[in-house]
Amino acid sequence: MRKVRAYILVEGRVQGVFFRATARDVANELGIGGWVRNRWDGKVEITVEGEEKVVKKMVDWCYQGPPGAVVTQVKVEWQPYQGEFNRFSIRY
């Protein structure tokens, strides 16, 4: 299976609704590496790497997010796989 990397920018009511913690849990369940963090402008950004099929599941999840989130837009930038991560973490 082909490995990929995605940079995801999530907009809407996505801070203060456990988006980062839930994204970490979802990524860990899927077995993919990367990170998630809140941005100063109210958006959440995520970088994730893994098998293409599984990374696409993470991208799909971002369109909904956790209960309480109201996602208005998701931007995805596909990047070359770098093998940079062996786990998924929350960055502050």
Image (spheres, grey):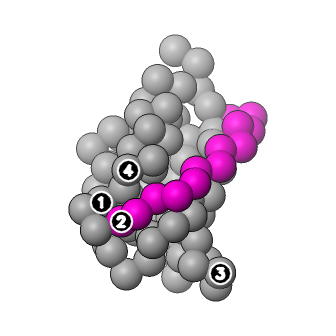
Read off the magenta span: 69-84
Q: Position of residue 27 (x, y in %)?
A: 37, 48
User: Residue at 58% across / 71% down in the picture?
Assistant: 43
User: Residue at 40% across / 63% down in the picture?
Assistant: 70
Residue 23 vertical position relative to residue 61 in the rendered view, above or below? below
Report which residue position mark 2 lands on.
69
Report which residue position mark 1 lands on.
66
- The amino acid beneath tag 2 is Ala
Mark 3 lies on a secondary structure that is loop
User: Residue at 52% across / 82% down in the picture?
Assistant: 92
Residue 57, located in which quarter of the rendered image? Answer: top left
- The amino acid beneath tag 4 is Gln
Q: Earlier in the sequence, mark 3 or mark 4?
A: 3
Mark 2 lies on a secondary structure that is loop
Report which residue position mark 4 lands on.
64
Q: Position of residue 76 (x, y in %)?
A: 65, 44
